Image (cartoon, rainbow, N blue to C red):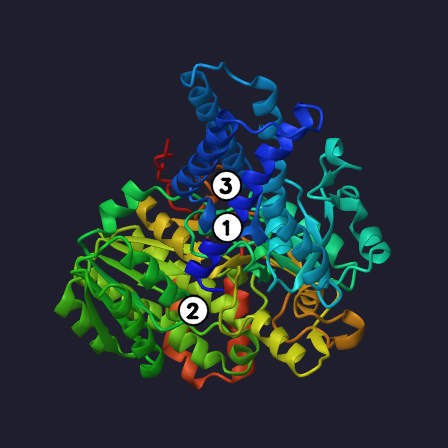
Amino acid sequence: MAYHQRLSLLIFIDSLFIVTTIFLSNLLVYDRHLILSSTLIITAITLLVCHHVFSFHFKLYKKAWEYASIGELIIILKIVTFSIVIAAVVQQMLGQGVFLRLLATTWMLHMIFIGGSRFWWRIVRDTYIKKNENRKRTLIIGAGAAGTMVARQLQTSNEAELLAVAFIDDDERKHHLDILSIPVVGGIDQIEKAVHDLRIDNIVIAIPSLSKRELNEIFQECAKTKAKTKILPMLEDLVTGKVSVKQFRDVQVEDLLGREPVELDIESISEYVSNKVVLVTGAGGSIGSEICRQVSQFHPKKLILLGHGENSIYSIEMELRGIHKESNIQIVTEIADIQDFNKMISIMEKYHPDVVYHAAAHKHVPLMERNPEEAVKNNMIGTKNVALAAEWNDVKTFVMISSDKAVNPTSVMGATKRLAEMIIQDMGRTSKTKFIAVRFGNVLGSRGSVIPLFKKQIQKGGPVTVTHPDMVRYFMTIPEASRLVIQAGSLARGGETFVLDMGDPVKIVDLAKNLIKLSGNSVDEIGIKFTGMRPGEKLFEELLNENEVHHKQVFPKIYIGKTANMFMEEIDEIIRTYMIQEKEALASTLVALANRKESEMIRMEEKPLPIPG
């Protein structure tokens, strides 16, 4: 019905109600005898006019009554009360006194007729028009403000696919109560029972303030059921209106890390990045590209994207240009191989960067086991090339991205990263350039990580392949790792190995089970197959060996390891002879040297670091 047609109908119906109300009140007050008088007629006209005036003022006729709530009821209360008050004033002005009993009865009937006529439509809609039989039965985790908001919107929306049938909340004061006619059936430990007893199809986690560890605990309970689990969008997205409360999203593996984001020291980062020339090697890779994104937020004067793969460099260049099209950041690309020393010198001389983030490396463990000479060329010689070029061109800070696999390495990849750390630590002893290494574990979603592999295997119907049931790894999201790398650069004094706090280690088999569950499947449907450990792999990864342990944090989630042995003569010998060695012999030499310990260890004198705050 068009608005003008609807308006005319409502005015006509309300007018009938008001006239009926005044005369019905007269019958009830005066013992069922209708007493017509000029005062009664004037009162009726006054009520009629005032009701319509106030209705327009409070926009009563513009309300969608299928969504009527307490707000609409308060508006009706104001309109009726104000109309009765003015009618009383008119009666007083007529000089015959105020008919209190008549007006009180009229007020009550007026509220019943006007309010009832409006809310009747919502009752009919909720009871008869809304079809619940085809909606998915849903359990809402959290009976607080967010959970209540979710339930209310599901109840009032005809388009909603979900039907809220119960709440779960750990607040015992809410247990056995009904909220919006929906029962609170217990705490988190009752999820599995509630899903079974109430035939739940979907679970919605509606607690935006949850820590990741708490979310992980709730999800593990949800994973015991066959119901599909979704989560409410971030609270700030709801508040700012970016998303609706009904736009639930799937729980992602990043949500289950049990880690909280670290707050960065923006001032210290800005001091060494803002309005500076920054060069990132491996800028097209997972970590390198994210470092570019994070650095660009601090408005460097120039950002140089250096990489070997033209497609990946082009992709990050276009992305950054799109994001910063209104800023003055100069984004420059260089297609180059870090193994080309002359090219590295040329690039450094051309741009004279203030900061270099060296993220280029070969990281795939099994591939490097089969090609140890390539690991030497890229991870060791490439690092040395970039570091020397940086030193010769007075770069202020050089940050090398290392790996937890460099600790007590059993693989070629880990060994070459450890030896590359030694190279830059040795340079850091005498150079004006601050050379540091930043060491962390696996990053979720990076190329070569298990997450994309598991997802592909799940899409194909399984099984998911896990090397060993007891294998554990540290995990961190790419953005968090990149932010902490940038933060570590601000703490550099030269020669340190910074270690990022990776939180608690995660069993790979548990990660696989979570991903299967998140995909909407069961472990029985997809299956998990144990394939055995590959060459160079370890069951447990470490972040510091026994000679490097330094437990004190220099910044939240950032530690510094004591500088241990450096075997520069042996490293130089490997670089000179790696091409003439057999692959097996080269691999053994690399791993043995990276793990060598001497009775008299060469240690650098520790340099104290300022501890923020």
Q: Write down the quadrant of residue 356 in the picture.
A: bottom left
At x 43%, y 52%, the residue is: 241
* Whole-percent x, y for residue 186 in the image: 79, 42
The answer to which of marks 1 and 2 sits earlier in the sequence is: 1
559 vs 88: above or below: below
At x 34%, y 41%, the residue is: 265
Residue 147, can we see it? Answer: no
Image quarter in which the C terminus is found: top left
The answer to which of marks 2 and 3 sits earlier in the sequence is: 2
Q: Residues within 10 Å of mark 3 (few under 14, many from 20)?
A: some
- Mark 2 residue type: Ser
Alpha carbon distance from label 2 to label 3: 29 Å
Q: Nearer the viewer, residue 199 or 34?
A: 34
| Residue 286, disc | 2
* Whole-percent x, y for residue 128 in the image: 72, 60
Nearer the camera: disc 1 or disc 2: 1
Secondary structure beneath label 3: loop
**Left or right of 76, for residue 121:** right
Q: Residues within 10 Å of mark 1 (few under 14, many from 20)?
A: few
Q: Residue furthest left?
A: 350
- Mark 1 residue type: Phe
Which residue is tagged 1? 12
- Mark 3 residue type: His
Residue 386, can we see it? Answer: yes
The answer to which of marks 1 and 3 sits earlier in the sequence is: 1
Which residue is tagged 3? 550
* Whole-percent x, y for residue 449 in the image: 55, 70
Alpha carbon distance from label 1 to label 2: 67 Å
At x 86%, y 55%, the residue is: 197
Q: Residues within 10 Å of mark 2 (few under 14, many from 20)?
A: many
Alpha carbon distance from label 1 to label 3: 82 Å
Secondary structure beneath label 1: helix
